[in-house]
Image (cartoon, rainbow, N blue to C red):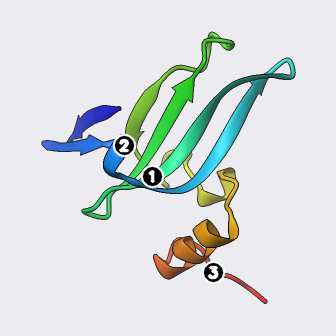
Amino acid sequence: MKTTINNKRYDTAKCETLGEHDHYNNGNYSGTTYLERASDGQLLVHTKSNGQDCYLKDDLRAFDSHFDDSVDDYDLTDEQEARCAELGLIDIIS
């Protein structure tokens, strides 16, 4: 998916995935939201919907921690967790 944010064109096919969150509606899978990082460092929220939930739609927008976005909302693999720590998005406490 592609979008323009602040006159910059972003393509999720060229972004790094830092985490994902699956959505369910009445127990049925309805789509996934991805936390993506573009090559310029911009964090993006990319949602892919399968049409099972009328409130969930395909979307690509800038990550906004002042709005309602949090890295806590995403499931992270060990590699993604390490990358988020490296980028300063999370702190890993042993």
Mark number, residue 91: 3
Q: Earlier in the sequence, mark 2 or mark 1?
A: 2
Q: What residue is disc 2 on?
A: 12
Residue 5 drawn at (x, y percent): 23, 41
Q: What is the residue that sits farthest to the left in this orientation?
A: 7
Q: Of the residues shown, which amino acid type is indicated by label 1?
A: Glu
The secondary structure type at the circle numbered 2 is helix
Contact (Cβ within 8 Å) of mark 2 with mark 1: yes
Q: Earlier in the sequence, mark 3 or mark 1?
A: 1
User: Does residue 84 sit above or below 49 in this rendering?
Assistant: below
Horizontally, residue 29 falls left or right of residue 58, namely right
Nearer to me, 70 or 49: 49
Q: Of the residues shown, which amino acid type is indicated by label 3?
A: Asp
State the quadrant of the C terminus. bottom right
Q: Residue at x 47, y 38 (%)?
A: 46
State the quadrant of the N terminus. top left
The secondary structure type at the circle numbered 3 is loop
| Pointer 1 local density, CA inside 10 Å: few below 14, some 14–19, many at least 20 | many
Q: Residue at x 51, y 50 (%)?
A: 35
Horizontally, residue 22 falls left or right of residue 55, namely right
Contact (Cβ within 8 Å) of mark 2 with mark 3: no
Mark number, residue 53: none
Horizontally, residue 89 falls left or right of residue 94, namely left
Residue 72 drawn at (x, y percent): 67, 58
Q: Residue at x 45, y 52 (%)?
A: 36
Circle 3 or circle 1, nearest the eye = 1
Spatial distance from mark 3 to mark 1, Cα to Cα?
Answer: 18 Å
User: Does residue 12 sit above or below 75 in this rendering?
Assistant: above
Contact (Cβ within 8 Å) of mark 3 with mark 1: no
**Residue 78's image quarter?**
bottom right
Q: What residue is disc 1 on?
A: 36
